[in-house]
Image (tube, rainbow, N blue to C red):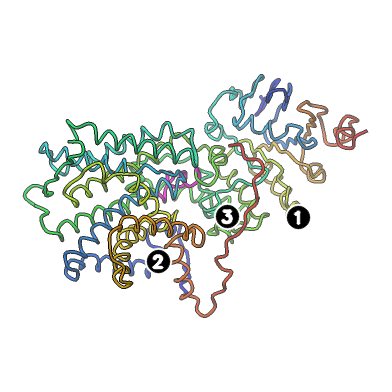
Amino acid sequence: MHVVRKTSYDQDMRLFAHRGVAFWYGVLAIAALLAPLALNTYYLSQLTFVCVYAVAGAGLMLLTGYAGQVSLGHAAFLAAGAYTEAILQAHGIPFVLSLPAAAAVAAALGLAVGIPALRLTGIYLAVATLAFAFIVEEILARWESVTRGNFGIAVDTLAIGSLRFDAEWKFFYLALGVLVATLLAVRNLLRTKTGRALVALRDSTIAAQSLGVHLAWYKTAAFGLSAGLTGLAGALYAHKIAFISPEQFTIMVSVELLVMVVVGGLGSLHGAVFGAAFIVALPQAIVFAKGVLGISGSGQAAVDAGVFGLLLLLFMLYEPQGLYGRWVKVRYYLEVFPFYRRATFRRQKTYARTERLQ
Amino acid sequence: MSLLAIDNLSLHFGGVRAVEDVSFRVEPQEVFTVIGPNGAGKTSIFNLISRFYDANAGRIAFEGRDITAIAPHEVAQRGIARTFQNVELFEHASVLENLLLGRHVRFRTRLPFELLFTPSVRAEERAHREKVEEVIDFLDLQHYRDTRTGSLPYGVRKVVELGRALASGPKLLLLDEPSSGLNNEETEEMSFWIEDITQELGIAVLMIEHDMALVREVSDRVLAINYGRIIAAGDVESVQAHPEVVRAYLGE
């Protein structure tokens, strides 16, 4: 087991706790960079999807995992980013401008949702965001002069200047780059004043307020940032799919995004990435399982939805910290082997709070 | 000039008069204690000062400036920090993060720079960390620095909450039952800290307390209330001996 000896305050601000961690992230980075050599186009394409989903996951994690605000409407922000990108590209706006614009449009929508959401918490907030997502979906279908309605929009191959992202590996590197930048930015945020304020908002609004945390400001900011990142993912998604239409941004996508952060592990950035990998791998696993079990026929979508729901339920019951929580436990088990005690991670019951104001 | 001046403060919930025409003054560096039976309106007074409740009548002034109608998050900026009766820590954050949140109002970093973690952000984090370490030293919390507060024993949580309030660098500290849930030793320690807070750090303390031994030990002045009204005020002995106070606690 590695015990870190701390000799300076800067040590607590580092991205990597110690050299061992930095080393393994280095290995991971090299593996990611070499992935196009080792994987065929199909698997590389799936890996690209993981990157894109993980960007959206980081956005939702910030809002739900850190600031504690549930959203059942993130498909709307994904759609906002995707449509902004598709429409701007069709008008000949270069990618270096349209990508930030996609994030900005989604962020603006997020702020617009965030302000009325200030008075809502828990289930009410979930329902409000859900309603918002339906409104956006409906607008996409009806505003035909701009969105081409249910016909959808074909999205051209992405190009920056003369560099065309026509091969899978090129787009993979772009998605990977955006993911790394996103994770770094969110991680930076979490180790500063704003990140702590979001956590404060989640754990005790009343104490946060008494310490001078401006609830309205931080809640709105959380919505704006989260939506902006999801919009960023949406822009990449549009290019990856090459065709977007309203039925790609239904309630099911919002649920998928939420499943992603819950199964990944609320309150950790690792969770966002693990959850993205889970979301992409699960349908494949189901197809594989059906092949092995010899089950044939239609209804893949229904089976997917059923398994999603079941897994969400099981995770909430037995591993509320998600895949990341499981990962921490397994790693700890190996580190202290053979001294692991079952009670190490036992959940504690906390005192009931009798004097809640809100 | 008094540090905190409360004049004719009233708070009604429908027909319930939680606080009725309460006036008192807290002077710099003193320990001012509010006592009274359960439901007397003590915590309501705190919540009025914290601006969680809107007063129906009366005025609260801090350092001569009216704070009766400011936003709740501005109270900390003015230099008033508080603790809660049932401990309101950020349970999924470490002690260090809780204390850094105490310094929230002193941070001047801006969101775009935080996203990039620029050298200026780092420098500010470092400066505030130093302040937090002073509090950690003051309250002997070194051992718990990186522990998640949700897994700490209750007594330590109370100290962390006190530390979080101190970290904000207040001029007035509101302590809501600092000794509740503590054993004798921990209560004794708490009384030493309260004395140090006023004498060494020069911070005034306004507290609600039921443990009369602790009240006697640290209080400069005591105010007794019942049914939202003041029934006695003055030094500890005279308030404790006051017939109204005896009646409120023991009945007739």
CB under 8 Å between discs 1 and 3 = no
User: Is residue A287 a member of the stretch shown in magenta?
Assistant: no
Secondary structure beneath disc 3? helix
Q: Quadrant of residue B28?
A: top right
As drawn, the label of residue A18 is: 2
Residue drawn where x is 22% and y is 55% of the image: A175
Measured as percent of width and height from the top left, residue B223 is found at 78, 31
In this rendering, would A334 be left or right of B245? Answer: left
Q: Which residues are magenta?
A: A190-201
**How many neighbours does mark 3 have within 10 angstroms: few (below 14), some (14-19), or many (20 or more)?**
many
- Judged by depth in the image, the label closer to the viewer, 3 or 2, is 3
**Chain ID at mark 1:** B
> Rounded to the nearest whole Å, what is the CA distance between mark 1 and mark 3?
19 Å
Residue drawn where x is 38% and y is 62% of the image: A16
User: Is residue A194 a member of the stretch shown in magenta?
Assistant: yes
Q: Amino acid at mark 2?
A: His
Looking at the picture, does residue A277 appear above or below residue A145?
A: below
As drawn, the label of residue B149 is: 3
Q: Main secondary structure of the magenta part?
A: helix
Secondary structure beneath disc 1? loop
Task: Give the residue at mark 1.
Answer: B183
Tell which residue pokes out farthest to the front in this image: A297
Q: Can you say which quadrant of the picture contains the C terminus of chain A?
A: top right
Same chain for mark 3 and mark 2? The answer is no
Q: Of the residues under marks 1 and 3, which one precedes in the sequence?
A: 3
**Chain ID at mark 3:** B
Tell which residue pokes out farthest to the left in this image: A162
Nearer to me, A219 or A185: A219
Q: Quadrant of residue A114?
A: top left
Secondary structure beneath disc 2? loop
Q: Quadrant of residue A136?
A: top left
Q: Is residue B119 visible?
A: no
